[in-house]
Image (cartoon, helix red, strand yellow):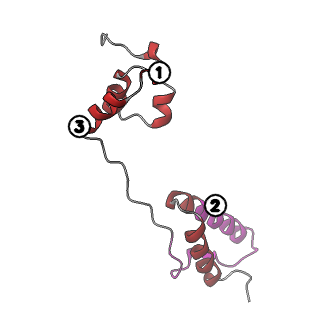
Amino acid sequence: MPSFQPGHIRTWLGELEENVPASSHRRIIFGTVSAAFAAAVDDGLLSKNPCRARSVPVPKPAPPRVTPWTIAQVLAVRAALPRHLGPRSTVDFASGCGLRQGEVFGLSEDEIDYEGE
């Protein structure tokens, strides 16, 4: 009897679902494990990849969670932004360009072209 069965992978996927909240991370982990099993098959160590069995569900991607802010939300955040955190126009710039949090925090004031040239 082979060491790894599809049932083992299904059990492991259930545990992965409980312990790794981000579906994108679960997909990466599953892909890495499946690639390792594929290499073992290529090297003749296993006859089949248990991750590729029809009974093993590949972790599904999460639906996109990005919901653009409304104009009212942008204006509210802009008005509430304390001056010591930077120019309020950064909120306009970030929301208009769809910047992520790290991109906004990494943005320096001298990188903003206020004249639009």
The residue carrying pointer 3 sits among few (fewer than 14), some (14 to 19) or many (20 or more) residues within 10 Å by Cα, namely few
Type of residue at label 3? Ala
Check if residue 49 falls in the magenta segment: yes
N-term-proximal mark, 1 vs 3: 3
Q: Position of residue 8 (x, y in %)?
A: 65, 81
Q: Position of residue 3 (x, y in %)?
A: 74, 82
Image quadrant in which you'd find residue 71: top left
Q: Nearer the viewer, residue 107 or 27?
A: 107
Element at label 2: helix
The stretch in magenta equals 29-58
Q: Depth-wise, is mark 1 or mark 2 nearer the camera? A: 1
Type of residue at label 2? Thr
For the C terminus, the image quarter is top left
Q: Depth-wise, is mark 1 or mark 3 nearer the camera? A: 1
Image quadrant in which you'd find residue 56: bottom right
Q: Nearer the viewer, residue 100 or 86?
A: 86
* Residue positioned most to the bottom: 1
The disc at residue 72 is 3
Q: Depth-wise, is mark 3 or mark 2 nearer the camera? A: 3
User: Do the residues under discs 3 and 2 have CB atoms within 8 angstroms?
Assistant: no
Identify the residue under disc 2: 32
